[in-house]
Amino acid sequence: MYSYLFRGATLVDGSGSLPCMADVAVAGDRIAAVGTDLDGVAERVVDAGGLVLCPGFIDIHGHSDMTLFRHPLLESKAWQGVTTEVIGNCGLGLFPAAAGGRGALADYLRLHDFSLPDGGIEWEDLAGYAARVDRDGLGINVAPLVGHAPLRIATMGMEDRPPAVAELARMEALLATALQQGAWGMSTGLIYPPGSYAETGELIALARVLARHGALYASHIRNESEKIAAALDEAVAIGAGSGVRVQVSHLKAMGGSNRGRAGELLERLAAARAAGVDVAADQYPYNASATTLTAVVPQWAHAGGVAALLARLADPAQGAEIRMQIGHEMARREGAAGIVVTGCRSARNRGLSGESVARIAGRWGCSPEEAVVRLILEEEGNVGAIFFSMAEEDVATILADPGVSVGSDGHALNVAQDGSEPTHPRSYGTFARVLGRYVREERLLSLAAAIRKMTGLPAGRLGFADRGMVRPGLVADLVLLDPERIADCATYAEPHCYAAGIVHLLVAGRPVIEDGKMTGNRPGKVLRKP
């Protein structure tokens, strides 16, 4: 007996093949049958006429490890059709955590707006972290990468130097342990300390460990603006020097000097593939990025951790140099008017959330550089920002490339609980935006091509053997959506709005969304690489 039988759906199977009419049957946590006029009895028969049935979307680049202890249902991702999110991106992550260094890791993650569970970090490795997450259950699955920053912090803290031989060996051993425990790869965030302190040789050494385990190297590369060509070359060199699969995170051409260069960047990756390096990319379909405001602070000022950073900002002798470099970095990102502050927590600054740095500087009667320093000091480093720095035509060019997966770079949010805080709309709208705007309205992509970018393509990059396609025997992570209604409702002005158009969402055969309503079920778990 089937648990679900979807009849007469427009099946888009995740492979890129043309849509076709089909029935799909689910038994337990697996897809039992795919065909026309399927026989059999089902607990629930769904008339799927006029609707699209496809694999659950795989968010290859997410950050819901920031919020999943607050929002275990991962609502804003589920309403987009996501059934699995890859976490631990941009070098960030909650493991490994050295027994004596958990406080340092916690302080670092708070700088990046992570919400920790009651009791803080109580684990040391992936096994302990996964057990803690699975204890409460999740609405959708998460697939963890090892963050390069926790590897470094566990070994050498926030020091700005190459690792000694013994320290590199320890990082390699910690990475190998995490991979043996089921991590799908390792990520780097090479614009964020301590990842920015790593030289290419260190990264190649760690990538060789990944290659031996058949795991992925995902990188927020060292520069995404005027030096992006050199940064891409470094990512390719890491792949060539180690044999690892390379995934360039949230590929973009950032800043006025880069407008129109998207095609050139894609050609660079294609040339690397032709030369034998397995390299691809992912992207979110927006013209603004989002990260911590401390990203405009020079990297040397972060050495030693949050307390050291704040001390340098407050020190008159170092402050002038830091402010000058902040000004240069803001200009590179198209100026203070294009940087919108988000997530101020203190009572005195909460009202500034949603304002540009330029407006805040005008209100305070100071330079934009001084406003940045004051915000970081008063918020103790924990303040986010949205950077409007990409051209729409470059966004579309990258999205159209068949080797580019869709990844949100966002985290799970809840409208009722988070609705008063400014945020980036990508956390609510990425996947629906591709299907609504770029497939239905602009016809940049076919429906089959777009869904492949969200399912079969990322599954192949990660090495998922039982997800990403609609095939008998695979896990029943499935989405039933209305192709005429699917749309992102979140905007920069009103970012807290769930996507529209998802009718049913199954995770391992259990409904997370049923008839357009969230069920509250928690069938998701931490997926481990076999």
Image: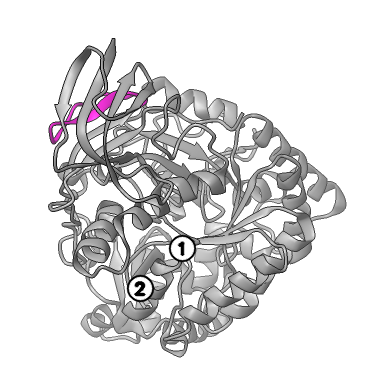
Q: Position of 518 compared to 254: left or right?
A: left
Q: Residue furthest front?
A: 37
Q: For the N terminus, which image quadrant?
A: top left
395 to the left or right of 274 = left
Q: What is the basis of the colouring in this image?
A: one colour
Q: Residues within 10 Å of mark 1 (few under 14, many from 20)?
A: some
All told, the count of numbered labels is 2
- Residue drawn where x is 68% and y is 70% of the image: 234
Up/down of 147 relative to 390, above or below: above
Residue at 26 percent of width and 57 percent of height: 435
Magenta residues span 508-523
Q: How many residues crowd around disc 2 within 10 Å: few (fewer than 14), some, or many (20 or more)?
A: some
Residue located beneath label 1 in the image: 402
- Nearest the camera: 61 or 157? 61
**Residue at horizontal 63 percent and vertical 65 percent from the top:** 196
Q: Is residue 517 magenta?
A: yes
Position of 360 with respect to 524 (left or right) is: left
- Can you tell which quarter of the image residue 30 is in? top left
356 sits to left or right of 65: left
Say which label, 1 or 2, has the lower sequence index. 2
Q: Secondary structure at mark 1?
A: loop
As helix, strand or loop, the secondary structure at mark 2 comes to helix
Return the residue found at the far right.
Answer: 165
Where's residue 324, x and y in %?
50, 87
Percent from the top left, x then y, of residue 181? 64, 29
Residue at 54% x, 46% y is 460
Residue 396's tag is 2
Q: Residue 137: x and y, percent?
A: 37, 24
- Label 1 vs label 2, nearer the camera: 1
